[in-house]
């Protein structure tokens, strides 16, 4: 694993789907924590999540004026492969935008939607020894 020495986290198994990093495949967020689908800027499709895992801040926090108001933001990247995925809302000046504080807005093109059944099957496959080792253990 690249990045920090902390352990990789997984999204809850009790959801129908989750989103993973398109670059490395690690879990990022659960579909049940998806608050909003929209855009970053004028044309980049994005998803706003209440909770996420395996993200880390990159760079300094910044103040930015967006179409819905002024915010303090922190750019976020994948903890594993270091690809910048979006930003986290640290503060919002407008009262009606406070629901965004603590949430992450991530570029949809940098995420992959995975059904949880696919994810559990893949995770279980990694835990099993290769077929040759399974045959040796059976003897």
Image (tube, rainbow, N blue to C red):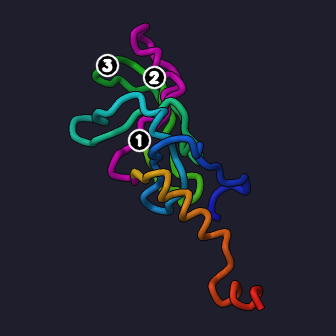
Q: Which residue is mark 1?
A: 106
Q: CA distance from mark 1 to mark 3?
A: 17 Å
**Is residue 111 shown in magenta?**
yes
- The correct choice, above or below, for 112 with respect to 97 in the image is below
Q: Are marks 2 and 1 in contact (CB under 8 Å)?
A: no
Q: Helix, strand or loop at disc 3?
A: loop
Report whether residue 56 is seen. no
Q: Distance from label 2 to label 1 (Cα)?
A: 13 Å
Tell me the tag on residue 68.
Answer: 3
Q: Position of residue 108 (x, y in %)?
A: 34, 46
Q: Is residue 27 above or below residue 52?
A: below
Residue nearest the observer in this picture, 82 or 11: 11
Q: Quadrant of residue 23?
A: bottom left
Q: Position of residue 98 (x, y in %)?
A: 46, 15
* Residue at the spot of label 2: 100
x, y percentage for residue 35?
A: 41, 28
Magenta region, residue range: 86-112
For numbered disc 2, what is the local secondary structure? helix
Tell me, for residue 12, which label it has, or none. none
Q: CA distance from mark 2 to mark 3?
A: 11 Å
Q: Nearer the viewer, residue 63 or 106?
A: 106
Say which quarter of the image contains residue 47: top left
Q: Residue furthest top?
A: 95
Q: Mark 2 vs mark 3: which is more N-terminal? A: 3
Q: Residue at x 61, y 49 (%)?
A: 10
Would residue 10 be visible to someone looking at this image?
A: yes
């Amino acid at each position: 694993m690249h990045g920090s020495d902390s352990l990789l986290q997984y999204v809850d198994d009790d959801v129908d789907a989750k989103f993973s990093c398109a670059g490395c495949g690690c879990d990022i967020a659960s579909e049940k924590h998806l608050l909003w689908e929209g855009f970053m800027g004028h044309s980049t499709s994005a998803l706003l999540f209440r909770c996420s895992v395996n993200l880390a801040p990159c760079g300094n926090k910044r103040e930015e004026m967006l179409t819905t108001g002024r915010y303090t933001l922190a750019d976020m990247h994948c903890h594993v492969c270091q690809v910048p995925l979006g930003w986290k809302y640290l503060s919002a000046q407008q009262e009606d935008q406070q629901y965004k504080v603590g949430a992450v807005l991530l570029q949809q093109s940098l995420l992959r939607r995975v059904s949880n059944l696919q994810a559990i099957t893949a995770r279980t496959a990694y835990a099993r020894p290769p077929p040759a080792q399974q045959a040796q253990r059976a003897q």
